[in-house]
Amino acid sequence: MSSSSPAYTGFRKSRGWGVGKLGTRGTIAVFVSIFAICMSPMLGSLSFTLVLVAVAIPTLFLTVIPFGERTAMGHIAHHGRWASAGNATAWADDVFEEVARGENLPGVLAPLCPIKVEDGRGGYQCLIWNRRTGILSARLHVSPVGLTLADDDDALQWVTNFGGLLADLGHMPLVSAIAFTAESAPSGGVNQRAYTVGTAAKNWEDGRLVKDSPQVCREILTELVSQSRATTAEVTCLVTINFDLKNAVPEPKTLAEGAAEVVNMLPRFESSLAASGMTVTNRASTGQTIRYLRAAFDPAVRTADFSQDDELWEWADAGPLRTEESADVYSHDSGYSVSWLMKAPPRGVVRYRQLIPLVSPGRYHRRVSLVYRPYSAGEASKKVEDEVNAGTFRRIWANKTKKDETQRDHDDRVKARRAAQEESLGAGLGRFTMYVTTTVRNEQTLAAACSDVEERMGQAKIHFRRARKAMAATFAASLGVGIEPSAGLSRISTERWGS
């Protein structure tokens, strides 16, 4: 990390000790098959050997040899699950129902349940409990200082402190993941106009500024509001911390004990985020969480007046009235959404300004969520050691087969050794992924919105792919409400907290 240009590096995809592109499981399957075929003649039955060869070759072809991102069997299973779902991904909340649906949200959001708890400061906050995984999530509204006009020394300090925050997560077994969500939407100047006129002038009177305000102030404010109405944006930044209380010692027995454990840990995160350049403005309340989800499903209500008391909002208000998922588009109430997920980590050095094109406001609504899942300190040392041994195994295999080591394998082995060295010096180790969602109200502008997002992805130099046939789940994962597809969407009762 250079003091004049702070950056992140060392990103690599976990490969295991598989040969080539086969991976660990594929390599084991190939070696076991070859060993079985070679040993079968010792049984004295040629017909058994021929049957074994006839079964092993097509099986390996379907389950081991990769075709693009998946094996042939993986492609068949993926398309089969989508075809068998039929119309099960559609959702309708009609006025008349024979069977009440309760207060569940659609799809993978169904097990979420809001919990209103005291924040220890005389107020209340909302925790989200995933009843299918046992994860308890706390959402913090933050206001990043920003790097556009920041001094390089300050930026270096924020980057360093952020790295320290991620390293500390390895010593917090309760933390399952932490998600950073940045959402921007063109506001059309409605919120900006209300703030400028209502706050600066302190009052409205029959749609005009109060008469006792100075004339020059009224003229300046009126001109500024009229000129900037089409260029303003509504930006929301959230940090969601997912807690797995199954790892707590002692394990909380009740929901109240679990909520108290989470609330007690939040001040530590608030201090760390502030040192990383993100000021925590408030902890999300139940009403804020409901309004956030409602606006995600129904973008037409973004300009509505949401100043009502939180007590007037119910969890059922957070969900959509209708949704329908196709292979490439997720339609919900007044919006149409397309989502992407990260395909591969960035190569080389990532500068601290690299994500600015992806998270900065534009003409269309966009939501970017970065999810980081830390390894515990004990798991991290074992993981980096396994990756170093895997790189050594591939090099030995290349020598035994008299093949030159590829440059990619060499670079990967160097990165693995560097990661092991950094971990021994106290650095954290974790897995991360990113989700991007764009939403429009007019389906005819969806293609333009997608082009805008993909152009920004190219500027950020991160490889994404569209979440075809998984739009609804990826849309939910990008919301930052405790949905972690990479960690599984459900757990058995013996492995989840609160069951």
Image (spheres, rainbow, N blue to C red):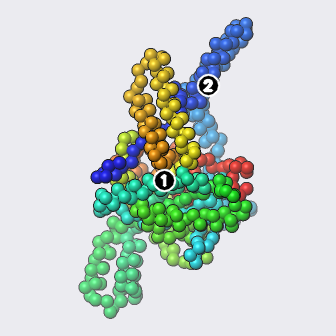
Residue 29 tag number: 2
Amino acid type shown at disc 1: Leu
Could you say which quadrant of the image residue 113 lies in? bottom right
Q: Is residue 491 above or below residue 286?
A: above
Could you say which quadrant of the image residue 417 lies in? top left
- Residue at x-position 56% and y-position 48%: 376
- For the residue pair 128 and 468, the one nearer the viewer reads as 128
- Residue at x-position 59% and y-position 34%: 74
Q: Is residue 482 above or below residue 428?
A: below
- For the residue pair 224 and 401, the one nearer the viewer reads as 401
Q: Is residue 65 visible?
A: yes
Amino acid type shown at disc 2: Ala
Image position, residue 410 (x, y; %): 41, 29
Q: Is residue 444 above or below residue 385?
A: below
Q: 235 left or right of 83? A: left
- For the residue pair 20 and 277, the one nearer the viewer reads as 277
Residue 166 tag number: 1
Image position, residue 234 (x, y; %): 42, 66
Q: 499 left or right of 368? A: right
